[in-house]
Image: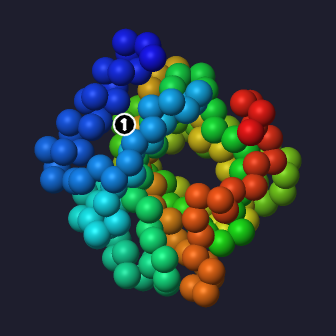
Amino acid sequence: MSTEKKEIFDRVEQTLQSQGFTIAAKDETRPWGGFFVIDEAQAQDFANQYFDGIDVENLRIGGKLSPKILIVAPEARLSWQYHHRRAEIWQVVEGTVGIKRSTTDEEGEVAEYHPKDQVKLQQGERHRLIGLSGWGIVAEIWQHTDASNPSDEDDIVRVQDDFGR
């Protein structure tokens, strides 16, 4: 892992801990960067901190909200993907990131998002988070769309992926 990547992950981890969050999982090994998963019991606190207090009970429907911090490396991008059983809400925390969105498999144009910008991705909407010139940090929560079959990490359809997944 590069020194720069280690420093950013260490800084984000320290920030989350100083905010009182319990880190349930972290992954620094993704080729595009990585993420931190926050304890599900702290979903409302996470929403208060990163999503201007959005009421998580209105999002929950059934299943987890999976509060996460995504860290995307400069000039890296996540897969072009969508989900069958969830919508997602992203809020840029730090840096400028690119996001592509489309209702079809054809990738849309890259739009730039800055700290405090929020994006609501609909269930089935294709999307891709892209690192631009610097590191980007994005908070994410899920909105389940099927109470009888809540979304999970397997609910990813990759239309295109730079890393062959």
Q: Nearer the viewer, residue 86 or 132?
A: 86
Residue 75 lies, in percent from the top left, at 59, 22
Would residue 106 be found to the left or right of residue 84 on screen?
Answer: right
Q: Nearer the viewer, residue 30 or 18?
A: 30
At 51% across and 41% down in the image, what residue appears?
113
- Packing grade of label 1 (10 A; few <14, some 14-19, many >=20) is some
Q: Quadrant of the C terminus?
A: top right
Residue 85 lies, in percent from the top left, at 65, 72
- Asked if residue 63 can be seen in this view, the reply is yes
Quick check: 57 above or below 72? below
Quick check: 93 above or below 132? below
At 76% across and 49% down in the image, what residue appears?
158
Residue 13 lies, in percent from the top left, at 27, 37
Would residue 6 be found to the left or right of residue 60 on screen?
Answer: left
Residue 19 lies, in percent from the top left, at 17, 50
For the residue marked with disc 1, what is the amino acid?
Glu
**Which residue is identified by label 1?**
94
**Which corner quadrant of the image does residue 9 belong to?**
top left
Q: Quadrant of the N terminus?
A: top left
